[in-house]
Amino acid sequence: MSARVEVVDQAGLGPGAGPVSDLVAAALEAEGASGAVVVAFIEEQAMAVLNARYRGVDEPTDVLSFRSEEGEAGWPKSRTGPDLGEIVVCPSVVRRYAEEEDAVFGAQLGWTLIHGVLHLLGYDHEKDDGGMRRREQGLLVELVVAVRALDGR
């Protein structure tokens, strides 16, 4: 199985594309998934616009996932395999959540990326009676080295 991860950083995230790409690819592999994923880091204002448009919530959030369904209008066809979709992350909100939880930024970012991956793969924490949350925790343990690399550890 093969995962291709493209990282687009419009927000000056910091850890670089390598550790982000590595974690997302590892999470996909752990789930037995392959395909292409774009991870985009954006500013709060842009995230607030997306959150209002797609979720009806007029404020920024930490992460949104947009699944690419087969034949869905607006998604270009991949030449290298199935497109799984896009994970959009707002680093300033992730940083704020980390501070509120007294967590390290990289650990919070790792959880955020894993959360986004699981949504791309069809998990839904609002409907699954805790299954997604349990899988997030399992992946955080399983992929701890990749999560720590987000902080350079």
Image (cartoon, rainbow, N blue to C red):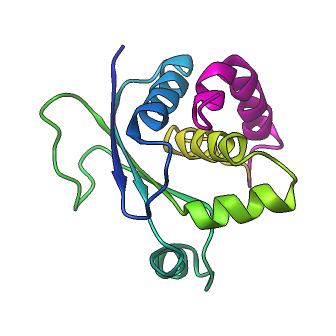
Residue 104 location, quadrant: top right
Residue 60 in the figure: left or right of residue 77: right
Q: Residue at x 22, y 28 (%)?
A: 81
Residue 80 picture location, percent across and down: 17, 28
Q: Is residue 152 magenta?
A: yes
Residue 70 in the figure: left or right of residue 60: left
User: Eyeballing the image, is 56 above or below 77?
Assistant: below
Q: Tell me the quarter of the image containing the N terminus.
A: top left
Q: Residue at x 83, y 43 (%)?
A: 129
User: Eyeballing the image, is 24 above or below 29?
Assistant: below
Q: Which residues are magenta?
A: 126-153
Q: Is residue 26 magenta?
A: no
Q: Residue furthest left?
A: 79
Residue 52 picture location, percent across and down: 54, 82
User: Eyeballing the image, is 40 above or below 11?
Assistant: above
Residue 116 picture location, percent across and down: 56, 46
Q: Tell me the quarter of the image containing the C terminus.
A: top right
Which residue occupies the foreground of this view, 1 or 63?
63
Residue 40 location, quadrant: bottom left
Characterize the magenta stretch by its predominant secondary structure.
helix
Q: Residue furthest top?
A: 1
Q: Residue at x 72, y 34 (%)?
A: 136
